[in-house]
Amino acid sequence: MLFRSTPVYKGFKKVLLGTPVLIMGAAKANPEMIDSLGKGTPDDWVEQNVYSKYPFLGLGLFLILNCLLFGWWGILVTVCVGILTPLLGAGLLNAVGHSQGYKNHDAKDSSSNMLPWGIVLVGEELHNNHHKNPAAAKLSEKWYEFDLGWLYISILKRLNLVKIRE
């Protein structure tokens, strides 16, 4: 089923500023959508017994960890990463990624790739590629597409900290 919370259906401003709310509403209307969005992600004890029961605990733990690492600056780090990223990052990504750019694939939605935003969006600027293969670790397909996220994943793989599912 096509997720209809793109600028084509909801308008650029609503998607830019309200993507998390739109996703939560769509998830309530279509619960099986959550399963499709979480395909391939861990469903371990912590997910089942902690994060599912206490959804804001992750943000709280993130705040505590940041304060331990950065002192009082950890509050600013948490606000910037933990709050602004979902609100503006997801909103901006979906608003722009579904309204302008180029396509490598005929996706069943309005997703498009946006260059040259690779440094800022860590690979998600390749939104059309992501919609074609959502589970892919590497999103770049053309020689001129830069996927910073793949660079990070490759470094973590060389350090034996991650395994890439093929």
Image: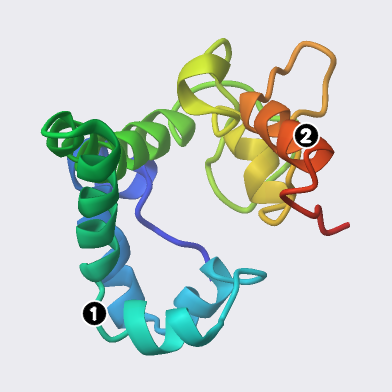
Q: Which circle marks residue 154 in the picture? A: 2
Q: Please indicate whether residue 127 sits to the left or right of residue 49 in the image.
A: right
Q: Quadrant of residue 56?
A: bottom left
Q: Quadrant of the N terminus?
A: bottom right
- The spot of residue 59 in percent (x, y) is 24, 58
Which residue is at 35% across, 54% downward?
Answer: 5
- The spot of residue 23 in percent (x, y) is 32, 62
Total numbered labels placed on residues in the image: 2
| Residue beneath disc 1 | 54
Which residue is at 21% across, 53% downward?
Answer: 64
Which residue is at 44% across, 87% downward?
Answer: 48
- The spot of residue 126 in percent (x, y) is 62, 30
Which residue is at 55% across, 83% downward?
Answer: 44
Q: Quadrant of the C terminus?
A: bottom right
- Tag 2's secondary structure? helix
Q: Please indicate whether residue 58 sits to the left or right of residue 106 in the image.
A: left
The numbered mark, 2 or 1, whose residue comes first in the sequence reads: 1
Q: CA distance from mark 2 to mark 1?
A: 32 Å
